[in-house]
């Protein structure tokens, strides 16, 4: 219980420090399967946020396996688990099954973020779509899905796992900004597939398919980019790194790839009808990346070929998001609070 309250205090303080401007207060809910919190389900807590309320909410989830699909329909929400290993949201859903009775994708994921909902933080939690392991179909199985107009979404110390493709689908084509730190991503084709700006740091990836692991859509702005730093990729034998169907821009910095990775560059996958790329197919850049026990010619340092030709030291959150957003300052508050507690 002591650890629960400690993490809970961190989450509440993060809310106050990060979102205090322009609001008239802060509220929070505790979710616990055993009935010791305010609610026994996450969706009950989310549904209890008053419509039109200007307050900011933190949902703290105690350890347990929550077999539910959730819908986030308010901005400025922090969903914080008691621990990444033991706080689990798990549900089985397949996109094509959902679309049989619905006109759009809203509801086809385990975590569904409504269009134009922003400033959402997930902390210390595992979210899993287990449809494939239950029914043997590994088609598109969203874990987290956002839509146009939704931006500034952060995952910290989270696991996003799908038994199908498109696990993490943050899909605001024009203006999306996403930051993920110390996370684990697992899935099938295109299991991490952002649109817009995305920075991932200090994370691990595991791919189960032979098509692609990562994917990017940067077609609305030449500056949009998908940057992965100091991360590790693994998967089944001959797993490929990535692909794109529209204009895209990839930067991989200080990444390590297991010996299982295929000797195959991130590639353009033509569509029917064909798409014409505005900025070319070759916007794929590496710096200080390596494959364990192998050498691939396409994995050479080439930042100088970028239109922006940045030095590796310049590739930080300010550079990635073009000075429009500073997600690091939000997460820094957590470290400051931890340090202050250690001194007491």
Image (cartoon, rainbow, N blue to C red):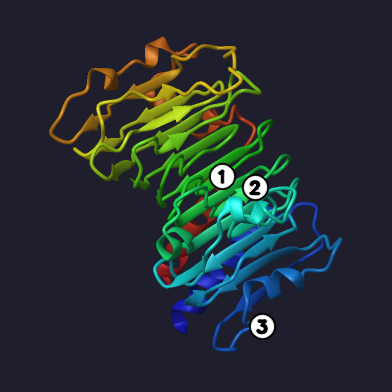
Q: Which marked residue is nearer to the observer: mark 2 or mark 3?
A: 2
Task: Write down the residue under mark 2.
Answer: 146
272 up-or-down from 187: above or below: above
CB contact under 8 Å: marks 1 and 3: no
The one of 306 and 26 positioned closer to us in this rendering: 306
* Mark seen at residue 144: none
Determine the secondary structure under disc 1: strand
Q: Earlier in the sequence, mark 2 or mark 3?
A: 3
Q: Is residue 28 visible?
A: no
Picture coordinates of residue 236, whole percent (x, y): 27, 45
Q: Residue furthest bottom?
A: 35
Q: Position of residue 287 (x, y in %)?
A: 32, 24
Q: Which mark is residue 169?
A: 1
Tell me which label, 1 or 3, sits earlier in the chain: 3
Other residues around mark 3 within 10 Å, as few (<14) / some (14–19) / many (≥20): some
Image x and y of residue 146, in percent? 65, 47
Q: Position of residue 120 (x, y in %)?
A: 64, 53
Circle 3 sits on which residue? 38
Determine the image quadrant of residue 293.
top left
Mark 1 vs mark 3, CA separation in Å: 30 Å
Do we see residue 151 in this rendering?
Answer: yes
Q: Note whether 169 is above or below 130 in the view shown.
A: above
Considering the image in quadrants, where does the C terminus appear?
bottom left
Of residues 122 and 103, which is closer to you in this image? 103
């Amino acid at each position: 219980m002591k650890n629960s309250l400690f993490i809970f205090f961190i989450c509440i303080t993060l809310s106050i420090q990060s979102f205090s401007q322009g609001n008239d207060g802060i509220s929070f809910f505790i979710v616990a399967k055993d009935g010791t919190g305010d609610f026994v389900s996450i969706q009950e807590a989310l549904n209890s946020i008053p419509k039109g309320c200007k307050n900011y909410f933190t949902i703290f989830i105690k350890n347990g396996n929550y077999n539910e699909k959730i819908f986030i329909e308010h901005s400025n929400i922090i969903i914080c688990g008691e621990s990444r290993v033991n706080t689990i949201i798990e549900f089985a859903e397949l996109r094509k099954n959902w679309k049989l009775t619905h006109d759009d994708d809203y509801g086809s994921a385990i975590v569904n973020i409504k269009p134009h909902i922003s400033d959402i933080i997930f902390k210390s939690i595992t979210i899993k779509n287990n449809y494939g392991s239950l029914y043997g179909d590994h088609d598109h199985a969203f874990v987290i899905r956002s839509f146009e107009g939704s931006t500034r979404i952060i995952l910290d110390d989270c696991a996003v796992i799908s038994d199908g493709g498109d696990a993490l689908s943050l899909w605001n084509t024009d203006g999306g900004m996403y930051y993920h730190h110390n996370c684990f991503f697992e899935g099938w084709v295109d299991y991490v597939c952002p649109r817009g700006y995305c920075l991932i740091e200090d994370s691990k990836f595991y791919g189960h398919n032979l098509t692609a692991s990562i994917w990017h859509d940067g077609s609305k702005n030449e500056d949009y980019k998908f940057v992965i730093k100091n991360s590790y990729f693994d998967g089944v034998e001959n797993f490929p790194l990535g692909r794109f169907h529209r204009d895209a821009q990839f930067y991989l910095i200080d990444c390590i790839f297991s010996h299982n990775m295929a000797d195959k560059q991130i590639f353009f996958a033509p569509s029917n009808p064909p798409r014409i790329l505005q900025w070319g197919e070759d916007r794929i850049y590496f710096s200080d990346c390596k494959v364990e026990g192998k050498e691939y010619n396409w994995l050479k340092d080439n930042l100088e070929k970028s239109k922006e030709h940045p030095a590796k030291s310049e590739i930080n959150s300010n550079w990635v998001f073009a000075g429009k957003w500073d997600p690091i300052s939000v997460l820094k508050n957590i470290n400051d609070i931890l340090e202050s507690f250690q001194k007491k």
